[in-house]
Image (cartoon, rainbow, N blue to C red):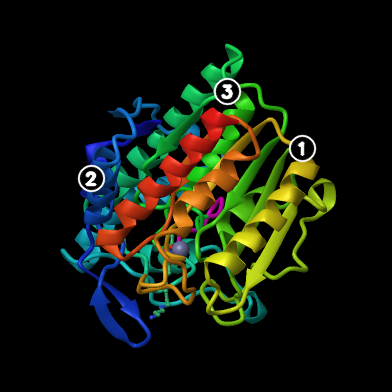
């Protein structure tokens, strides 16, 4: 399987994040991408190519222009105003208290960022844009394959990740929603209906928000129940979309302690619902922070689950873009991602 990755994606490397009252080392590191690259090479999964420089076109297809401007200028402005350490928000607008659009950088940070653990530093813009380009390029390659009558798949090694980013909101280590960008690119490439299946440990609140009112993109997710896990405020089963998108959002929140067998049964159930919905192309938000030894996980998945997750996803038989999301047990992350891609490839070519 073809992998798309840009070395520029390493340029985002904040030192620390605010977590439960403490500053801790930033978990979403460049080393994660290197672990995945090493896993792909070790497993002999195929070539790694750099993305096309697509400018801001693909990000503007799913994000607000003012938000994109904010991300592009935030670091330079922050350094002048505050100094040479990464930017974090200080306060958040709460609409029950009344609110006005922000007029200065600190107001904008709270306006455009929903959590306290997502930093903007030197290179964040460049890395996030390159990550988005990897998603869009992978989707363009898959679209081209589908047009030629070949059902194909590609892996976008996106980092920083994307599924928590909404049209005008960053958070959860995410700046641009790479999976949404891939889905939108597949739509432009001729797929009338796209399904996004999100297997990250966390609910993809940004992806859900972006496609909430749309019938042409199904968003289906299985994840830790938000009553105990980040992002806490959405991802519950009764969230099903609105307007034309009513019924095109599927959430399957899961209890703590999910083991391989229980997880694979839940995934099979979700995928049956996705298949019934009908789609011409698939985007997988591929997080492996479901791993039992992941520092953010409350599940108990073993390494043996990952090839089976890949095979289950391949069972949909659709042109597929797999987009990297979470996974913070850095050593194991590369092996587990390569295992998903290997399991996918085996089942895909056999099917
Ligand atoms: C893309 C992605 O996986 N983003 C995840 C962002 C989660 N950030 C906040 C995590 C806070 C919870 N910390 C729990 C530690 C459990 N040992
Ligand atoms: Zn996650």
**Magenta stretch: dominant secondary structure:** loop
The quadrant in which residue 89 appears is bottom left
Magenta-colored span: 166-172
Is 224 positioned to the left or the right of 88 in the image?
right
Q: Which numbered disc flags the more N-terminal residue, 3 or 1?
A: 3
Q: Secondary structure at mark 2?
A: helix
Residue 79 among magenta residues: no
In the picture, the disc for residue 151 is 3
Screen quadrant of the C terminus: top right
Q: Is residue 39 above or below residue 205?
A: above
In the picture, the disc for residue 38 is 2
Neighbourhood count class around disc 2 (C-alpha, 10 Å): few under 14, some 14–19, many 20 upward: some
Query: Looking at the image, how many numbered discs can be counted on the residues?
Result: 3
> Which residue is at the front of the view, 292 or 201?
292
Q: Which numbered disc flags the more N-terminal residue, 3 or 2?
A: 2
C-alpha separation, residue under disc 3 versus residue under disc 2: 26 Å
The mark closer to the camera, 3 or 1, is 3
> Which residue is at the front of the view, 337 or 158?
337
Residue 171 among magenta residues: yes
Screen quadrant of the N terminus: top left
Q: Which numbered disc flags the more N-terminal residue, 1 or 2?
A: 2
Is 85 positioned to the left or the right of 166 in the image?
left
């Amino acid at each position: 399987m073809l992998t798309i990755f840009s070395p520029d994606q390493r340029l985002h490397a904040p030192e620390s994040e605010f977590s439960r009252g403490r500053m801790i080392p930033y978990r979403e590191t460049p080393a994660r991408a290197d672990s995945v690259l090493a896993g792909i090479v070790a497993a002999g999964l195929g070539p790694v190519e750099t993305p096309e420089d697509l400018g801001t076109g693909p990000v503007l297809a799913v994000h607000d222009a003012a938000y994109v401007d904010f991300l592009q200028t935030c670091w330079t402005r922050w350094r002048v105003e505050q100094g040479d350490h990464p930017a974090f928000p200080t306060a958040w607008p709460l609409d029950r208290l009344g609110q006005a659009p922000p007029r200065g950088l600190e107001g904008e940070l709270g306006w455009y960022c929903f959590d306290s653990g997502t930093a903007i530093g030197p290179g964040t813009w460049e890395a996030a844009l390159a990550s988005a380009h990897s998603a869009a390029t992978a989707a363009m390659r898959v679209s081209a394959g589908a047009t030629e009558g070949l059902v194909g798949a590609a892996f976008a090694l996106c980092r920083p990740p994307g599924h928590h980013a909404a049209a005008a909101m960053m958070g959860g280590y995410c700046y641009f929603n790479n999976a949404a960008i891939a889905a939108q690119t597949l739509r432009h490439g001729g797929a009338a209906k796209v399904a996004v299946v999100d297997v990250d440990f966390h609910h993809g609140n940004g992806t859900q928000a972006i496609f909430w009112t749309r019938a042409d993109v199904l968003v289906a997710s299985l994840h830790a129940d938000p009553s105990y896990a980040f992002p806490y405020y959405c991802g519950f089963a009764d969230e099903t979309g609105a307007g034309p998108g009513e019924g095109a959002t599927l959430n399957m929140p899961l209890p703590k302690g999910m083991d391989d067998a229980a997880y694979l049964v839940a995934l099979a159930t979700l995928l049956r619902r996705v298949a019934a919905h009908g789609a011409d192309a698939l985007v997988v938000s591929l997080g492996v922070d479901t791993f039992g030894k992941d520092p953010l996980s409350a599940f108990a998945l073993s390494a043996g689950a990952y090839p089976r997750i890949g095979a289950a996803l391949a069972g949909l038989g659709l042109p597929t873009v797999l987009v990297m999301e979470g996974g913070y047990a850095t050593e194991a992350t590369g092996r587990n991602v390569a295992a998903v891609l290997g399991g996918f490839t085996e089942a895909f070519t056999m099917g």
